[in-house]
Image (cartoon, rainbow, N blue to C red):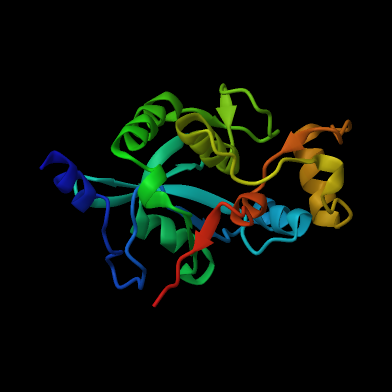
Amino acid sequence: MKKIIFALLLCATVTGGQASPLLQTGDLVFQSERGDFARAIQLATHSPYNHVGMIFIKSGKTLVFEAMGPVQFTPLEEWVRRGKGGRYAVKRLKNADKILTPEVLQKMDLLTRKFTGKAYDWTFGLSDKKIYCSELVWKMYRQSTGLELGHFQKLKELNLSPPLVQQQMREKFGPYIPLGLKIISPGQVFNSDLLKTLPQD
């Protein structure tokens, strides 16, 4: 009986007039945020998305667990409004019904307590002291399921030529750019072959 109730709580629709497929805990949502830093990420990674968060259903509410400033839960409706035109994409783990067991979902919930409140990492390191958005969802899945969503790239492998990208790198790193730094981008997570795209109405 507990498992049935738990499964029912995993699904919810987006309110506030936003069309959406049914969402469940563990889904990933991608959007394009505004601002120079967000635009630079898109230019550098050749991706339409510059931000990613993870869906959690808590007490019947649909929340996005994200690194946006400090790591936090954000109501989905608020999260959607931040993106350009309110547009976003949803990805789900293939065979999620088999992999995201109640035990795994419990691990994910415990991990949110570990990461909540962590400051945003503007220099894309991999320690847990600070954390950026795609690093957060990558670690959430790696530490709860053992799966790695997407491939890390070295900074020098990205498109660093646009003036906006160069400007943002100077602001974040100063005069010495760590070209060998390994990062996981929202675009790389989005393109993971472990995920499937959910259609939207």
Residue depicted at x 46% and y 68%: 86
Q: Which residue lies furthest to the left in this view?
A: 1
Which residue is pictured at 32% across the width and 32% down the height? 103
Find residue 12 and report its image quarter: bottom left
Residue drawn 35% across and 71% down?
18
Q: Which quarter of the rendering shows the C terminus?
A: bottom left
Judged left or right of residue 107, residue 185 is: right
Q: Position of residue 17 (x, y in %)?
A: 30, 73
The mark total stands at: 0
Q: Is residue 49 left or right of residue 115?
A: right
In the rendered image, which quarter is residue 130 located in?
top right
Which of 153 and 19 lies nearest the eye of the viewer?
Answer: 153
Q: Which residue is drawn at the image coordinates 38% and 47% (left, top)?
A: 98
Residue furthest toward the bottom? Answer: 201
147 left or right, relative to 173: left
**Nearer the observer, 91 or 17:** 91
Asked whether 50 or 20 is in front, the reply is 20
x and y, in percent, of residue 157 in the image: 85, 46
The percent coordinates of residue 119 (x first, y second) are 53, 29
Q: Height in image: 46 above or below 142? A: below
Relative to 140, does residue 130 appear above or below in the rendering?
A: above
Q: In this view, does 55 lie to the left or right of 38?
A: left
Q: From where the camera sits, is residue 36 visible?
A: yes
Location of residue 51 with respect to 130 vertically, above or below: below
Assign the N terminus to one quadrant of the image. Answer: top left
The answer, for residue 64, to whether it is visible in the render is no
Q: Where is residue 153 drawn, in percent x and y?
A: 77, 42
